Image: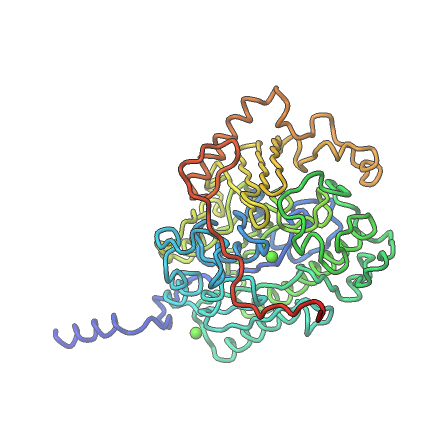
Amino acid sequence: MRITLTILLASLLVPNTGKTAALTGDRPNILFIIADDQSPFDLKVYNPKSALQTPNIDRLAAQGMVIDGAYHMGSWVGGVCTASRHMIMSGRTVWHIPDKPGRTMNPHVNNPILVPPGLAKFTLPAVFNRAGYDTMRTCKNGNSYADANKLFQVRRDGTRRGASDERGSAWHADQVLDYLNERESAKDTDPFLIYFGFSHPHDVRDGKPELLAKYGAVNHDDKTTLPPANPKQPALPVNYLPKHPFDHGHTTVRDEVGVKGVWERRDERTIRNEIGRQFACSENIDIQIGRVLKKLEAMGELDNTYIFYTADHGMAIGRHGLQGKQNMYDHTWRIPFIAKGPGIQAGLRAKGNIYLFDVLGSICDLAGIPAPATSEGISFKPVLLGKKETVRDALYGVYCGGGRPGTRCVKQGDWKLTKYQVEKTGVRHTQLFNLKENPHEFIKEHHDPKVVALTGIKPTQNQLNLADNPKYAVKLKEMEALLLTEMRRLDDPYRLWNQPGDGLETPKIKERTSKKKPRKPKNNR
Ligand SMILES: [Ca+2]
Ligand SMILES: [Ca+2]
């Protein structure tokens, strides 16, 4: 009896190596694929008219499901990746996550109630390590959650945005393939979680020559000239504008003025060339995904692996006259989200109404692991299994990385309210869209004959910002109330001009992460 008890106790105390059949069983593998800066509207599964060819992503979608309502919650800093990737890793909402060490762009970072100290111990790699998974990551460096990233058992990060295989997306796939080959040689049967991130199509969008040629684009780096026009280039986006009509809050951020190949230009040649480059880089990502899926199939692991494809946020590239990711239009607020795996019915589509921070709780749910108490996400497993259409009704988004309080949006049903307030320029602007009637968020500038001549798209009479239309005054009021409710619920530290102050103090932010060397004077006078 005593011996039995000892053995029993010993077996309970043995570290969870994941080696026993009872533990491994049929526990699913996870392959989480994430692109850097990609609008869902680039992909055929969201925009059948897109010229971008992604046969592997299309196949994933056909064999799995497409979520139409997937969002990132936003950002309080110009590097939207930073906030987005903290949300992914921690499963927490945008005002409840840490910033880079030493920086306080989220004014709540030093509030231990809202941002738990030691949160990294409850992030994606930590949770799956404790559950006996083998965890591996490849992704870009920087603008991410460093304390979480370092917890992956195998980490092969590097920023690869070059035009060659060694300096581009193939490098990330090579890291995953090397890892899978090592597992195969070692006959390692533990379940794995692989975080398969790409550095592209984030600029600089240096595509491979043969893919650039396919999309009629060049890696343009001469600021004094326009890139050549080429009929093979993708068309202008449907909601292209030559200029955004008002200060949206961050007109001087690098993405809007400093990206090599675009700079501050919004002309047709520049934008079509840049989209060609975006597509060349995106098709290369698709090719690399194909290599990894083929390997998983050869290993016999494909059917027991949940595969997710997403991006950290969307992207403008000429849509609404914007270039970057610092806005809340659907092209940038929404993200692609495709999932395939055991129990997910092929060819399914659902609204979902999910955020990226739901991923942690959902993956835990699929793997039978309790989500950490710090996770605020809602598991969308019921959506993946076809049991539910959505996990929430209302969606909130924020961008306040430039002028503050910045941009807020809220969506419910077909309606979306977006508000802009930039104190330093005095901008106070409200947009109300019915997304069912006006899915591309056309505003009056899209009706300009000069724009119509460029895009070939003539919006219908009602495809407008409806905020000033008295017919929708009741809807506007309802959406304004919903926005305030969401801002209060999510601990948004700011209030807009037409909202109650709620007794909030002016939020304190700190921009710099480290002490920089004093700048050299421009000349030695
Ligand atoms: Ca990004
Ligand atoms: Ca192992």
Which residue of the protein is positioned furthest toward the top in this rendering? 471
The answer, for residue 310, to whether it is visible in the render is no
Task: Judge left or right: residue 391 versus residue 425.
Answer: left
The image shows residue 311 at horizontal and vertical percentages of 59, 55
Which quarter of the figure has residue 340?
Answer: bottom right
The image shows residue 277 at horizontal and vertical percentages of 75, 58
Residue appearing at x 77%, y 32% in the figure:
447
Residue appearing at x 12%, y 73% in the figure:
1
> Which of the pair 50/87 is nearer the observer?
87
Task: Judge left or right: residue 19 versus residue 298.
Answer: left
> Which of the pair 102/13 is nearer the observer?
102
Residue appearing at x 34%, y 66% in the figure:
22
Q: Indicate whether 172 appears above or below 450.
A: below
The colour scheme of the drawn protein is: rainbow
Task: Judge left or right: residue 110 versus residue 82.
Answer: left
The image shows residue 271 at horizontal and vertical percentages of 78, 51
Q: Indicate whether 60 appears above or below 485.
A: below
